[in-house]
Image (tube, grey):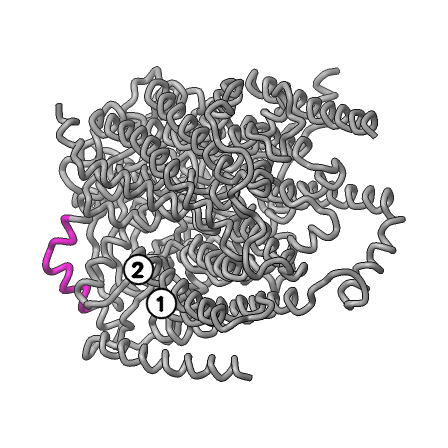
Amino acid sequence: MESQWLSLLDVTIDFDQSHLFFPRIVTWILVVLLAIILITRYRRLVPGLKHAGRVLAGREGDFDHRRFFGTLALTTAYFYLMGVLSDVFPNTGYSFLIMSVLFVFLLSLLYVDRPTRRLWVILVLNALIAPTLAWYVLAQLFRITLP
Amino acid sequence: MDILSHLTPMFFALIAAGTAIGIIFGAIPGMTATMAVAVCLPLTYAFGLENGIALLLGLYVGGISGGMVPAVLINIPGTPSSITTTFDGYPMAKRGEGERALKIGIVASVFGGLFSAAVLFFFAPLLADFAIKFSYVEKFLIILLALTVIASLCSNMLMGVFSGVLGVWLSLIGTYSITEGGNGEPRLMFDFMQYYLIDGFSLLPVLIGIFGLTTVLLDAEKGFRDETGQGPISLKNGAKFRFGVFKGQLTNLIRSSSIGTFVGILPGVGGSAASVLAYSQEKNFSRDSSQMGKGAPQGIVSSESSNNALTGGALVPLLSLGIPGDSTTAILIGAFTLQGIQVGPLFIGNNLDTWYLMIIALLAANVLMFGIMYFAIRHIARVIEVPKYILYPLIIMMCVVGAYAINYGIMFDVWTLLIFGVFGWVAHKIGLETVPLIIGFILGKSAEVYFVKSLESYGNYSIFFTKSPIAVCLWVLIAVSLAFAIYLRVRSRRQAAVES
Amino acid sequence: MKAIWSKTCLAVVASAAIGMSASAQAADDCPLPGNLRVVIGSTSTGGDTYQNSSIVVDQLADKLDINAKVDAVGVMPGFQALERSRHGNTVMIFHDGAYLGNLYGVNGYPDIFDKFIVGPTIAINPGNAYLVPKDSPYQSMSDIIEAAGDGKQIKVAIQPGSVSEIGFSALKNAVRMKYPGKEGNIVAVNTGSQADKNQLLFDGAVDVINGSVQANEQYTQLPADDQKAMRFVWITAREQTIAETDEAGMGDTTREQLLQYVTPNVSVPMTADQDFTFDKEFFFLYNKDMDPAAIQCIDDALAEIYDEGEIQQQQKRSFFVPDFKPSQEAASYLKEKNDQYKTIINDLKG
């Protein structure tokens, strides 16, 4: 009797297919949970999406488009150009250094409201010194591989 | 006698240097203890075994400890094991108690570190024999236990559990790794993604993306309005640190340190699970946990004592089985092999001098860590006063370094940072919970391997209940942990109802 | 607009400066970059690939007067980095796993002889071994082959698709030759790290594990009543390879004792008159478009280094057997090795 009951729990996993076994279980749990969430909260879903659309379009709420999308764009450009440039200067970290100087400066500039002359100097110095220091210590002293 | 001749000023200087460098690595978001040890590994060849080990152990202890700094001050965990430090550390910092929070963390760290060093010294071979009682089945249950903490850490049960499962799901993207015993086949992605995702997403870029870049994006969205000029958080006001805060924390300290040490001892469970387990056990079993997550010292105590206790624990299987207990000790093994020293079950017996020196180095590293951090913290804490328009670009830059360097130079890891930064922002908007998600992500891969391998070997689901007394004990713990989480949730809801 | 301008200017200035310094660094007749990146097919910096690569790369960098760094990126990222690097800025060091993965049909493994240039071999790790619990009924590989022929199931813990599996395949093949149809009694238990393999042995879940002299020797020294005690049954290296290790052997096991576990003392037949052997060899891999002059340059530098004789001492100290073969020789040698194992693996499939 007991062994019959136990055999219900028998499972054989074919090694060639074993990569799908656990992901399938997890995917099913995920789908079920998602369904529960949607069922219990569908009332809030549509207004929520509408609200989000209006906020992103800039018709509602406090959403700093310039800084948010600026951050995204700068970061994407930073990563992309760093990859491109690292093929020009392979294995030196120069690509990281050059792009970081530009990125740090531009991002700081984006975040500052009314840059005064003094602030400009600070930002320029910061953008020059910090990446150079990081590059020197990490790539030169510790020999960490940088882009 | 021979030992004394090794205790040169150089020996201690290297420990101090290692600890200091480690703290800096740990404190920079994106850089970790593992990385610190990895970059300094080639140096050890020149120093010789004893001095080399001194340096590396300093780095290890320093790196784990330094992780609390950004966790407390800017809500970005410096290392995966300091995620739980952000829960209470950052709220304290926002109240102006950053310095106090850090000092609490330092004291807890040194306690955890010394505790685990003592355990290592007295019980290493014994514990190693206990650790090998944990087969696939028991390890899976340990991971399941760690996953149940999601129930006590999330703010909404349904969303929290969903986020946790989503984290597990995300961790499975890629191939079923051959080096873990899988068949190397891809799943959960389209063919064109295989080129990049063959090894899946790496933990560190995911972590710093979700915590680091997301934070930047959330603030950018708000436009830094009050930012030009002084930072919003000052260090002036807020309570000062007193040792009195540890009154009544002894149970917490010992429990958390024991959990940390034990998780370290179990190879393959993953060090980051230590602080998460310790934190949730404190939340479940302490007399009053109502303030945890809002800036309670006890949360920092449990998180920091457990993650430092990991150090001694992870050295147990390394030195008594030749098997690393976590990612950092996996690199430490290289220091031994570079010197032609075998680590295995006979290591301690064959190399008594080295063994004693390691214990001394570990103790010294903890004490020096305390010394360096306790007195430097006043200055370190000022990071919080740096305006965000200076700080954030630098954080992103350092996250890039960390992401790129963690796997020794892979550009896709940098893109992972961006993908998960944006994902974290979206998750925040739609009410997903990032901490359960990360915990799921950290534990997902090992959960798969241990689960599938258990079933492959035994062919029946009942094995999880019948394998051994240890398995039964673990089920009891899982049940108790879940029950407590639900009980606490119901109780706090009732309290809230009464108050309103 | 302004930003773009400053960007371009900076890039131009920087590239000019760097171009000069880079060309100044490169040696006269050696078209190698001043900064050479050596990726390896392992993510571990504690493993044999890293250790061996760093010994060789350090010497090479000294000899060529360049900067060279070993990056433990792992197999697939390593192949990818190599593929992208047309100009020889990145080279790879890996072991027989590079082609075994392809032979076993592991997802993502290219045919390295077709896709890359196979460079010089540098060393052998002679330690690939198979172990049983100390109280195991199997005293030798012949016992295991006989038992399998007798209908006993024998579970072997391996990491699939690589160096760890090849000895297992050879064993299976030996059973097939002697007792056709019985090879199914040799069962693979696929697992990952050495820790996992050891654990399976401690649990009694497997009869034999793949391991190494370096990682498992201390376990063989434990008293028999210890749950962790193991015993070597087979070291896959050639007799001649083990004979070249230091006389002291590894740990408390002398070279004399190690020789007991290699052919002909332990026989796993591959053909009617030849025993199977496997030496885990480390070698360079280059991008298909790499400048032949650069390849020649590395060959020459290595030849000089090996002539000086110091590197051999260093390798032997770390239980590696020095084994330098220049590119051409190495490529045809490894191709031959590849074809040999291909036969075994295909015979087992069919």
Q: Secondary structure at mark 1?
A: loop
Q: Is residue C84 visible?
A: no
Q: Is residue B69 above or below residue C298?
A: above
**Residue C103 sits in which quadrant?**
bottom left
Residue at x-position 74% and y-position 28%:
B489
Residue assigned mark 1: A91
Q: Which residue carries the number 2 mark?
A: C69
In the image: residue B46, left or right of residue A141: left
Report the amino acid beneath label 1: Asn
Q: Residues within 10 Å of mark 1 (few under 14, many from 20)?
A: many
| Foreground residue among C69 and B28 | B28
Membership of B268 in magenta stretch: no
The answer to whether residue C310 is magenta is yes
Labels 2 and 1 touching (C-beta < 8 A): yes
Residue under mark 1: which chain is it in? A
Residue at 28 percent of width and 37 percent of height: C214
Q: Where does the magenta region start and end?
A: C300-313
Q: Position of residue A118 (x, y in %)?
A: 47, 69
Magenta: main secondary structure equals helix
Amino acid residing under circle 2? Lys
Q: Chain of mark 2?
A: C
- Tell me where residue B125 sits by quadrant: top left
User: Could you tell me how far apart the alpha carbons at marks 2 and 1 are, in whole angstroms?
Assistant: 9 Å
**Residue B322 place in picture, x, y as percent:** 34, 32
- Between residues A107 and B325, which one lies in front from this camera angle? A107
Residue B226 at what x, y percent from top left?
A: 62, 58
Q: Name the residue rendered at 67%, 31% in the picture.
A: B152
